[in-house]
Image (cartoon, rainbow, N blue to C red):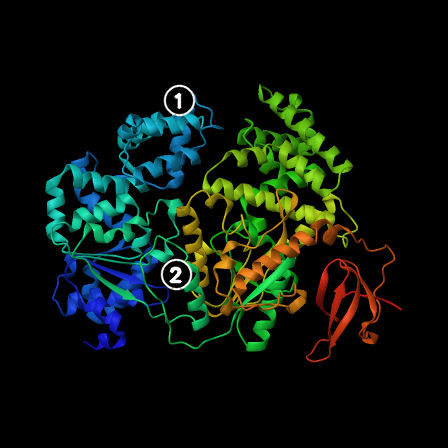
Amino acid sequence: MDYLDQLNDAQREGVINTEGPTMIIAGAGSGKTRVLTFRIAHLIREKQVDPFSIMALTFTNKAAKEMRERIETVVGSDARNLWMGTFHSVFARILRAEAHLLGYAKSFTIYDTDDSKSLLKTIIKELGLDDATYKPNTVYNRISAAKNSLIGWQDYLANPELRSDDASNMRPEIGNIYKTYALRCFKAGAMDFDDLLFNTDKLFKEHLEALNKYQNRIKYVLVDEFQDTNLCQYFIIRKLCSMWENICVVGDDAQSIYGFRGADITNILNFERDYPDLKIFKLEQNYRSTQTIVEAANTVIQKNKAQLPKTVWTANEEGNLIELIKAVSDNEEGRLVASSIFEEKMQHQLKFSDFVILYRTNSQSRAMEEALRRMNIKYKVVGGLSFYQRKEIKDLLAYLRFSINQNDEASLRRIINLPKRGIGDTTVDKLIVAANDHGISIWDVLQNATSFVGGRVTGTLFDFVTLIKRFALEVERKDAYDAAFEIAKGSGLLRELYEDKTVEGLSRYENVQELLNAIKEYVEDPEKTEKSLSAFLQDVSLITNQDEDKDKDPEKVTLMTIHMAKGLEFKYVYIVGLEEDLFPSQMMLSSRADLEEERRLFYVAITRAQKRLFLSYALTRYRFGRLKNCEPSRFLDDLDQRYIKVSTRFGGLESAPRSSGNYARSLVNGIKRTTSSAPVTKATTSYRAPSDFTPSDTSVLKEGMKVEHPKFGYGTVTQLDETGADRKAKILFDDFGEKTLLLSFAKLRIHT
């Protein structure tokens, strides 16, 4: 029983009370994994339950592996006999054994996502449908959502509401595609990922002998991250447990953030309705974070109406206040965050791996990556490629490069059939062979396609050549942004991404817009004298074509979306982009349920922090090629004033004075007043450095001196800080307000 000594009282109760329906509500950082694993170990070791009769369901193979290993340290090799794994892996095991009841062979094939989309693409073509309207990705997600809601193709076709919804979205044939797809999969003896759940429910619903078999065999079912289950998963669990009712679910409604994947928070909120004799244990002691972080998170999540009551607390140290970083622009936000990370690391002897930057959307990584690169801070992007390595970014960059240099074969290969224009690999191979045989460029071959490539494709090649020639003229006549925008639009890339309304499609569209934003910022940067597209691409190549990293030190700052960060923890956490329409997302403001999920996402982000938490936002941000005024996120107003201080380091905006009322509210209101009283156009476009600008020797700088900065314009030195390794100066600029600058880096011209 020594393992019980490692538990607090609440955890211990959750472990030893093994009979009947149980719900363990586990607050962030409360040790839920330990409780779940020790509960299983207790069943085997003390209750003498056969491991073959215990099923433990998780959402990742990694979680299942770690749990099994922990259980094995307590009970030994018996742990290997558990029914433990992800929902898909455990139910696939059942389906393998019972496949004949559903008309499948035991060796049925499992289609991955690419297999499924490829089949859908074929079906769409065979049905004579427009693949621009019926994009395989869109259709796949629609069918997946139906299966996760236990809607088969027959029910789908019979449901007038679903058919009407498809018709209003100009895709009335999705039901028929679903039918054809399901029948084709069955004929091929294949199931996709969603079928592993859908068919398990079908097995138990239509074949009671199979259900009875597993009800007798599985006497205890434990579910991790229960708040993330969908309708199909919950129905299967209920059927399995209906005989013994030894079901234990572990989760936290406050961390339910996967509604877009089909997760249904009502599964955990209404669990007691299905099991009136439910035993509830609350794990409320947080072992991860400081008191300040825990209490601040509580003030946020208490604003949600749909929740299970609990009060998370910690015995840890009080810790530092949460630091709020206010920036003029998203680029400055990146600079301030990078500077803060560097200073915190140096002051407290930390590792870069102690830091994480969390954002709402992948497109936000661009400004952060560039700021970190400029300070030579190593980083890694988790859950996605580095911004400039993402396919949609590389696609547009290839168009831009080829519009400048028509001898760029790599870019040509990438774009010649993108978007689809009927130029296949065989045609491209013919072009390359002809170029090599005649000692000319592929572009020369393209311009004389009729002489080298016969058939109907010559007309398509002629259209492509005409398109590129038009782009080349745009490059000559316009600055980098205007040319890039015309190419993005004229190529069809923007339209194709815009029309893909899936979560992935929207993300890709946002990423391309973020690239255009970067080009717009480049053009409007007064320090950039060359505004051409060629100059911008040269800058980008210096960022992306890095020398091979010879440093074997794995320590890097982590960048990831908040969704990817769930379940992780870091000593220092930076949550960036806290602005209305970004976080909370504009797409999540149509209902209270959506907004509350966004607030839970903010809660998850806050509770990743162990020691320090930093929040940041920008007053202006480029969106869709235009500079936008931004309002601070309403979530900042959810935070109690006692837990926040406003950063004035590195030239950040000054804070409003602390008031006796709600500080967070007065702070946000003060920020809004600042935004409206200082037009963005003045702060960003009123000053241009003269061509003869030459920095002065700042060693002679004194308080009261008038200075000129190439970006911020004219200002007055209000304070000099001689302490520390670097001299700093506080300067009140006419258009940008007060900034604190490091004199070793600042370019200042002194006016006497």
Amino acid marked by disc 2: Gly
- Judging depth in this view, the residue of 740 and 365 nearest the camera is 740
Secondary element under disc 2, as helix, strand or loop, is loop
Q: Furthest residue to the bottom?
A: 723
Q: Earlier in the sequence, mark 2 or mark 1?
A: 1
Q: Which mark is residue 692?
A: none
Few, some or many residues within 10 Å of mark 1 (<14, 14–19, 20+): few
Secondary element under disc 1, as helix, strand or loop, is loop
When the figure is inspected, residue 408 is found, relative to residue 708, above or below; the finding is above
Quadrant of the image occupied by residue 337? bottom right
Q: Is residue 44 left or right of residue 347?
A: left
- Judging depth in this view, the residue of 333 and 555 nearest the camera is 333
Q: Position of residue 268 (x, y in %)?
A: 28, 53
Few, some or many residues within 10 Å of mark 2 (<14, 14–19, 20+): few
Q: Nearer the viewer, mark 2 or mark 1?
A: 2
Amino acid marked by disc 1: Leu
Q: Which mark is residue 127?
A: 1
Q: Position of residue 393 (x, y in %)?
A: 58, 44
- Judge whether residue 233 can be spotted in this image: yes
- Judging depth in this view, the residue of 389 and 223 nearest the camera is 223
Residue lying at 71% horizontally and 30% vertically, measured from the top left: 470
Residue lying at 76% horizontally and 71% vertically, measured from the top left: 718
- Judge whether residue 329 can be spotted in this image: no
- Judging depth in this view, the residue of 47 and 165 nearest the camera is 165
What's the distance in space between the residues labelled 2 and 1, CA to CA?
44 Å
Quadrant of the image occupied by residue 304? bottom left
Q: Is residue 105 left or right of residue 443?
A: left
Residue lying at 16% horizontally and 57% vertically, measured from the top left: 277
When the figure is inspected, residue 209 is found, relative to residue 289, above or below; the finding is above
Q: Is residue 411 left or right of residue 227?
A: right
Residue receiving disc 2:
567
